[in-house]
Image: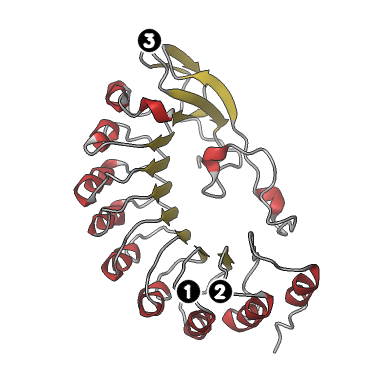
Amino acid sequence: MAEQGDSELPKRTVKFPTELSIGSLYVHQSGTAAFQLPSWWSFARTPYHFQGVTPRSAPAYRYYWKQLGSAQGNVEVPADHELALVAHEESHNHYDSLAKLLPNDLQGLRATFMHRGDLRFIANLTGLRYLFLASEELNDNELVGLEGLSELQILMLIGCHNVNTGLSALRDLTKLRQLELNAVDVTDRALVDLAQIPSLDLLIFNEMGMSEDAFITYLTPLPVPRLFLGNCYNLTVATLERIAQTYHGAPRPLVEFRVYDNTLMNGEDIKFFLKSVSKGQIEIFGIPGMPVTKDTLKQIEGVDWSS
């Protein structure tokens, strides 16, 4: 997200193909709150919440994006506004048109069904700050092309089954602060590379099948203050207990931890974990998709952190 008072983006005309639309465009005024969570591509306008339970810091989780129009022809973008392209799924055969854009034309891009080799078409978009990629064809060699996107702040990879050692390319992205890996078949070695990303503030693993030893050996040493684990089907209560014990001695403690859509846990398990993991350093804890009752939530909220 651009800082308050950011005036680096002048009024500009972005030239898209004239013969067809390659997606929908959204604008956001630089310096206002946005992209606090990686679900930015939904462009929701409501506070982020879980099952009707609103976090204490909910006012910070608002999005200020509005639709500008279609990505076709010449498009006028106001000064001090970031521009995001949500590419149509049927546009996957036209990603080559992105290579004709100027480096700072786009700040956000959501691209799905990319073919192998398509990443080269965005290598020139060095002003990208937010990038969503979903494709089974992307591989390690292509991820190297992300090294040049030095302004990248948020990255989400979905279903990239051939991505593993290529994550080492992210180590040079000094502004990257949020990373989500969703159904990405990484090995333990890839987690070592994630520890080398200097500015990472939020790390999300979703639908990942890492072993318990991988969670303990490679996950807990990561200097990341906010960690979300969703649908990690090898994540058991016993693993959480070990993570809790490990974080007691961590040099950079967790300030936010979420476990969601994990059918192996119940309210009592979460209550125990909350009490043991951080002694009050957890600000927000969301459990969407889990059968947690109001009584359980009251128990969690009433945990005595002083003991």
Q: Is residue 25 left or right of residue 100?
A: right
Work out whether mark 3 precedes mark 1 in sequence or the reverse, and give the earlier one.
Answer: 3
Q: Nearer the observer, disc 3 or disc 2?
A: 2
Which kind of residue does numbered mark 1 sit on?
A: Leu
Secondary structure under tag 2 reads loop
Q: Position of residue 263 (x, y in %)?
A: 57, 69
The CA distance from mark 3 to mark 2 is 52 Å
Q: Nearer the observer, disc 2 or disc 1?
A: 2
Please report contact status of discs 2 and 1: CB closer than 8 Å, yes or no.
yes
Please report contact status of discs 3 and 2: CB closer than 8 Å, yes or no.
no
Task: Please give the name of the residue rendered at 65% of the width and 43% of the height, measured from the top-left corner.
Answer: 62
User: Tag on residue 264?
Assistant: 2
Q: Which residue is mark 3?
A: 18
Work out whether mark 2 precedes mark 1 in sequence or the reverse, and give the earlier one.
Answer: 1
Secondary structure under tag 3 reads loop
Q: Residue furthest bottom?
A: 307
Q: Is residue 218 left or right of residue 241?
A: left
